[in-house]
Amino acid sequence: MKTFWSALILPCLLAGVDADWTTKIKVVRNPAYKLDVVDILANATMAKVEAYLERKIAAGKNNGCTLDTVVVRQEWSDMTNEQRQEYVAAVTCLMKRPSKAPKSRFPGALNRFDDFVAYHMSHAAELHDTIHLFPAHKQFVWAYEQALRNECGYTGYQPYMNYDRYAQDPIHSPMFNGNASSMGGNGAPDPTYKGIAQSGRTPNIIASGGGGGCVTEGPFKDMVVSLGPTSMSPIRGITKNPKSDGTASNPRCLRRDVNRNAALGATAAHAYSLLTSNNNINGFYNQLLGTPPPKNDPYPWGIHTAGHYIHAHDPGADPATSPGDPVFYFHHGAVDRLWWIWQMQDPENRINAWVDFTGGGGHTGHGRKRQSKLDPWKTVIDLEWLTDKSIPLMEAHDQLGGAGGQFCYVYI
Ligand SMILES: *[C@@H]1O[C@H](CO)[C@@H](O)[C@H](O)[C@H]1NC(C)=O
Ligand SMILES: *[C@@H]1O[C@H](CO)[C@@H](O)[C@H](O)[C@H]1NC(C)=O
Ligand SMILES: [Cu+2]
């Protein structure tokens, strides 16, 4: 087993003179998955990453981030079974650690894991308006990764999900097959669960994949979902929360509909088109969110929606409390990866690009306001009880030395 995995570490000796990164960053791949078009693009982008870092170092602006210190976020199935189980154990640990969120405001936050749900559900604007969506979620996922490491002894980094690997058969994938090294199984069949409505699209529903009930297999089968739903939740058939804002305790099982119909809207072809057909951040944002709905596509959701609804249903499909399904962090890690690959095609012009529809062309993606009146250069991301590090929003645009070096990671 050991030799099997070590054989996959691409030998440093193959590196050319211009590809120093291959000698410094360990690339581990699961041979069960062929690299897809996005993986190949991402690999080719590493030369630009390297050049970008060299320029920053020369300018003295890298904040200590170098190819020697950069950490690697891996795709879930590129991790060994042992690493996956270590990750799962850390998440389970977080669910046993005491909450730090204000008790009077969030009586339903029963543990440290719930603290992240509590923040997400009560800070919708700070996380989801056009200028915040990417950088605030970068900081949010980073804070979660820090909690796993610092509060639960996890020694790795936040994995991401390459949807394409699981799209054809998600319930039998390393992510959702329900064994000890998966992120838990599908929900039990619930014939009353029909899927997620998608008004204005054709088709106008992400039809049920056959689940919808409680998760019965794998690491999260005994998980208690406490917060939510809010009165705004699109989810039907769930016991109401005692408080209309969803902040009281409403203990229930984790429900899932691991959904192929959703996943097929986030294939490598979708991601490649997103990455290569948008020179402008507004276009990138709109296409990611599926606005306007893509034409001639049987899965016209946009990758962001598709990625969320791969793991519908409660709380995964509720925009306010979706981080209550631990797979949320794999999806927003994946979105962060796509943003980063897009940025690094042209770092000088794209790192500081933010979504701005004041010139028109906007869509009400994510159900939030079209444009923010805020000045991104003066805005701060403050995650309150999640981390004591408030950072300027624009600092979360650069994961190679941003926020004084807090961010120093790549996706492989
Ligand atoms: C990845 O990039 C490195 C150099 O940047 C190159 O040597 C290698 O062949 C690439 N691998 C693939 C699979 O494209
Ligand atoms: C779980 O499933 C994965 C993916 O099929 C497999 O590699 C692994 O050996 C299985 N068992 C355990 C205990 O991880
Ligand atoms: Cu999201």
Image: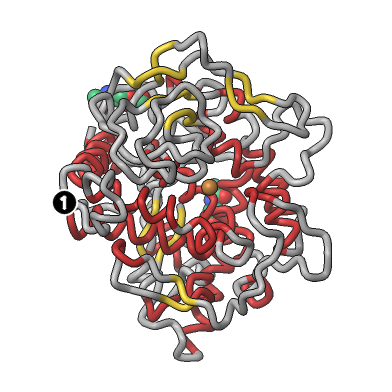
**Amino acid type of the residue tagged 1 in the rendering:** Pro
Q: How many marks?
A: 1
Determine whether 5 is above or below 156 in the image. above
Residue 172 at x, y = what percent? 43, 19
Q: Residue at x 16, y 51 (%)?
A: 98
User: How many residues crowd around disc 1 within 10 Å: few (fewer than 14), some, or many (20 or more)?
Assistant: some
Residue 149 at x, y = what percent? 23, 56
Query: Please, which residue is most extreme toward the top here?
Result: 191
Q: Which residue is mark 1?
A: 98
* Ligand 3 within 8 Å of the CB at mark 1: no
Residue 372 at x, y = what percent? 65, 68
Q: Residue at x 39, y 83 (%)?
A: 63
Quarter where residue 20 is shown: bottom left
Q: Residue at x 38, y 77 (%)?
A: 405
- Secondary structure type for disc 1: loop
- Viewer-side residue, 1 vs 187: 187
- Viewer-side residue, 76 vs 111: 111
Residue 376 at x, y = what percent? 59, 77
Question: On the rendered structure, is 151 left or right of 248?
Answer: left
**Is residue 138 visible to us here?**
yes
Determine whether 77 is above or below 333 in the image. above
Query: Please, which residue is most extreme toward the bottom here?
Result: 59
- Viewer-side residue, 46 vs 289: 289
| Colouring | secondary structure
- For ligand 1, which image quadrant applies? bottom right
**Is residue 326 visible to us here?**
no
Quarter of the image with the N terminus in it: top left
